[in-house]
Image (cartoon, rainbow, N blue to C red):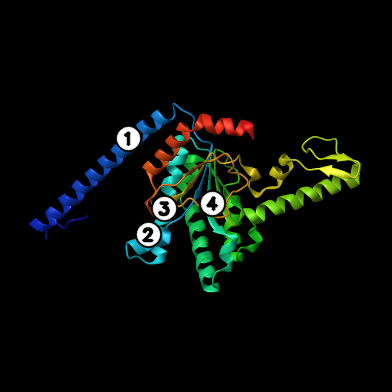
Amino acid sequence: MQVNPIITTDSSLKLVEEERSNGRIGNFLGGLNATLRKLVFRVIASRPIPEHIAFILDGNRRFARKWNLTEGAGHKTGFLALMSVLKYCYEIGVKYVTIYAFSLDNFNRRPDEVQYVMDLMQDKIEGFLKEVSIINQYGVRVLFIGDLDRLYEPVRIAAEKAMEATAKNSTTYLLVCVAYTSSHEIPRAIHEACEESIRVMNGNGFFNGSGYTNVNHGSQAVIKVVDLDKHMYMGVAPDPDILVRSSGETRLSNFLLWQTTNCLLYSPKALWPEMGFWQVVWGILEFQNNYNYLEKKKKQA
């Protein structure tokens, strides 16, 4: 705050001093929080760290109703929470973060509601690209997962720009599931695996090269689980170690059903805009406490 020495009053000087004091306190608390965060993460890092965490962002509208806000304000607050959660995940060493942004089933809503969500999604995609500090500091590559042809054109173009802008990054990944459901992903993968097997059979009688496991037994082809994995939308990332659904809900809502067989389900009671540092920490601690059990289940699968 600039003060004109000619018209300065006691009240204006007091205001300046309060602003300076608040700034010093804010900087001190910010530094204290960063130091505390590093100490907590250092302790956590002594045990296994999840490679991949997936989130169902549940509770934006309930948060808005809880605080008498507009629905748009709830989503905006949720976006800020997402930026914080991403930062905490990447700081602790999580390489892949997946978020469930928009289900294929959401297209069955009223046209005006779908349009609102599409406009909101476009705004958030463009807003994320402006978060240069997070993208550059953590080397984030953004991938959009799902039937992207179903998206409204402006949203699809924004998604393509985001993927292109971050294509050279490979330190961490943000996978955004849009126009996605597992009930669409799984049959699609089966169909593509069968088509590939037929092409192989028609071309060679059997496939003997590297990279696929289709085998021709007379007139039949065996399609293995690994063949389906390759054709899943989520085949670009390892299966999640933790699936987080905020607001205390335990429903999977048709999300990553194929990939979460041996995954920890963590359901903090916080609504999505209320998610922050401690929810991420407790989720990782829960994973670490169940790590041996989860690894045993994966080996048995």
Tell me how many marks there are. Answer: 4
- The answer for how far apart the CA atoms under marks 3 and 4 are is 13 Å
Does residue 108 appear left or right of residue 274 in this picture? Answer: right
SS under mark 1: helix
Quadrant that contains the N terminus:
bottom left
SS under mark 2: helix
Quadrant that contains the C terminus:
top right
- The answer for how far apart the CA atoms under marks 2 and 4 are is 20 Å
Inspect the image, locate mark 2, and give the three-letter code of the amino acid beneath it: Phe
Choose between 169 and 190: the one closer to the eye.
190
Please give the name of the residue rendered at 40% of the width and 33% of the height, measured from the top-left corner. Answer: 41
Residue annotated with mark 2:
63
Residue annotated with mark 3:
247
Identify the mark nearer the N-term, 3 or 4. Answer: 3
2 or 4: mark nearer the eye:
4
SS under mark 4: loop
Please give the name of the residue rendered at 39% of the width and 54% of the height, measured from the top-left corner. Answer: 273
**Could you say where residue 184 lies in the image, as x and y percent from the top left?**
66, 56
The answer to whether 124 is drawn above or below residue 288 in the figure is below
Q: Residues within 10 Å of mark 3 (few under 14, many from 20)?
A: many
Please give the name of the residue rendered at 46% of the width and 40% of the height, measured from the top-left corner. Answer: 89
Residue annotated with mark 1:
36
Inspect the image, locate mark 1, and give the three-letter code of the amino acid beneath it: Leu
- The answer for how far apart the CA atoms under marks 2 and 3 are is 10 Å
**Could you say where residue 47 lies in the image, as x and y percent from the top left?**
46, 27
2 or 3: mark nearer the eye:
3
2 or 1: mark nearer the eye:
2
1 or 3: mark nearer the eye:
3
